[in-house]
Amino acid sequence: MINNHEIIETIKMISEENLDIRTITMGISLLDCVSDCCDTLCEKIYDKITRYAKNLVSTGENIEREYGIPIINKRISVTPVSIISHACRDADYIKIARALERAATQTGVNFIGGYSALVHKGYTQGDKRLIESIPQALAQTERVCSSVNIASTKAGINMDAAAQMGNVIKETAYLTKDKNSIGCAKLVVFANAVEDNPFMAGAFHGIGEGECVINVGVSGPGVVKSALESVRGMDFGTVAETVKKTAFKITRMGQLVAQEASKRLGVPFGIVDLSLAPTPEIGDSVAYILEEMGIEKCGAHGTTAALALLNDAVKKGGIMASSYVGGLSGAFIPVSEDAGMIEAAMCEALSIEKLEAMTCVCSVGLDMIAVPGDTKAATLSAIIADEAAIGVVNNKTTAVRIIPAYNHKAGDIIEFGGLLGRAPVMQVSKYGSDSFISRGGRIPAPMQSLKN
């Protein structure tokens, strides 16, 4: 039974602490759209997406109004395009990307994810063609998001793919240079990608998923920060307990919205992703949570330990609130989208090296990081390989969403606007990794993979 105190508390979380549902994401299988004709494939893709998702945005808006809960984005994820295009010998991948864009525009969603390939052990012909097309696809669309999984704990790291993705990111940055290389903000490189992630740019509808599903991603760093203000000076057990209780409340709200959207749309409920996803709004910051724990500035010594506590407590609280917690679930550290991270990077408390250490314990990886536009492709590939190694060895999802900002240097500020925020351009190592990346092949899977 919900009492008056809980209602008032929830209203305060929404009105004063930036609590929101970050996204309702409808996952749609496109496996039955396969055709050996590209035009037919595109027509099937458009028809199926617009048929299933025609009421997604209006349903989300109705739930917002009726419950007073902000729902920031409505999104769609689809089966990785490289999979459904294999039979299409004349596949024009840019045409497929435009079909996804038209469907996203027609349904009114903010983003559509799934322009993706899974190449952690090797390439198919469809994978190769899709990855080569990514820069043009992202430059010619606004809502299409792309992801490539280059590594897994079971397979190791596909270093050929890591090398290629450095070049893909550089080309994407160049083709969208007139918009601060924003195309790179719609592209993520994964290790151990999950099939039910509702968050962009990495969302795709995995082949283990059903025909159609509703996944919800919640947020609420501001709520956690506010809760921790009441336990200043207390021990870490109290801190962890406070975060757990707060995560429970946040996840229950996500569960409510997910079930309501599922019922109204007639689509099965999938998972609640209880990630703490920050925004550029002051107060809605994961960095501020860490600083509330006692870190003077995010990036100082102790930051990784504080983030580990936060990530673990969020998961423990969330799994008590829902039997179907999934996605990435934890704490995101996207630099440009987090006011506290931006401040820390600008005063040089936070470096790429420290961020890499933090990704060992956060829920994803190096996210929304701007680097100088003249950063070499091999350096980008090496950054990707480092992050993939963390994911593979620790059997967790890691990712890189990095933006070599064309014509910008370290210390500049790149303005993206909206949820993407503003990115301080961070310095990379002056020493190269060209010979390492040029070796190619596959870094073998670690001992941890032998668990059968």
Image (spheres, rainbow, N blue to C red):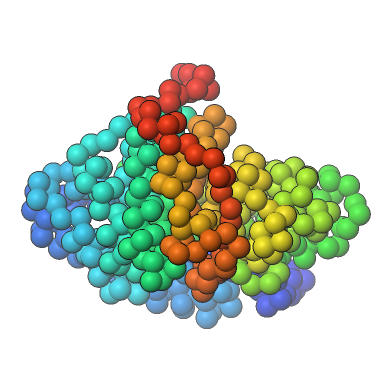
Q: Is residue 221 above or below residue 167?
A: below
**Residue at 77% in and 71% down:** 5
Left/right placement of residue 420 relative to residue 138 reads right
Q: Position of residue 106 (x, y in %)?
A: 28, 74
Q: How many marks?
A: 0
Residue at the spot 48% in from the left edge and 36% down from the top edge: 433
Please tell me in which quadrant of the rendered image residue 93 appears: bottom left
Q: Nearer the viewer, residue 79 or 441?
A: 441
Left or right relative to 44: residue 380: right
Is residue 213 visible in the rendered image? The answer is no
The x and y percentages for residue 385 are: 47, 37
Q: Quadrant of residue 413?
A: bottom right
Locate residue 83 relative to residue 409 in the image: left or right. Answer: left
Residue at 46% over, 58% down? 373
Is residue 99 visible in the rendered image? The answer is: yes
From the viewer's side, name the closer residue of 341 and 4.
341
Q: Nearer the viewer, residue 452 or 420?
A: 420
Quarter of image, res 218: bottom right
327 w.r.t. 182: above or below: above
Residue 10, percent from left and from top: 69, 71
- Image quadrant in which the N terminus is located: bottom right
Query: 98 or 211, which is in the foreground?
Result: 98
Q: Is residue 452 above or below residue 20?
A: above
Tell me what residue is drawn at x 38 percent, y 71 percent.
Answer: 178
Q: Is residue 58 above or below residue 341?
A: below
The residue lying furthest to the bottom in this view is 65
Q: Is residue 202 left or right of residue 222?
A: left
Furthest-right residue in this view: 233
Pinpoint residue 226: horizontal percent, then vertical percent: 77, 65
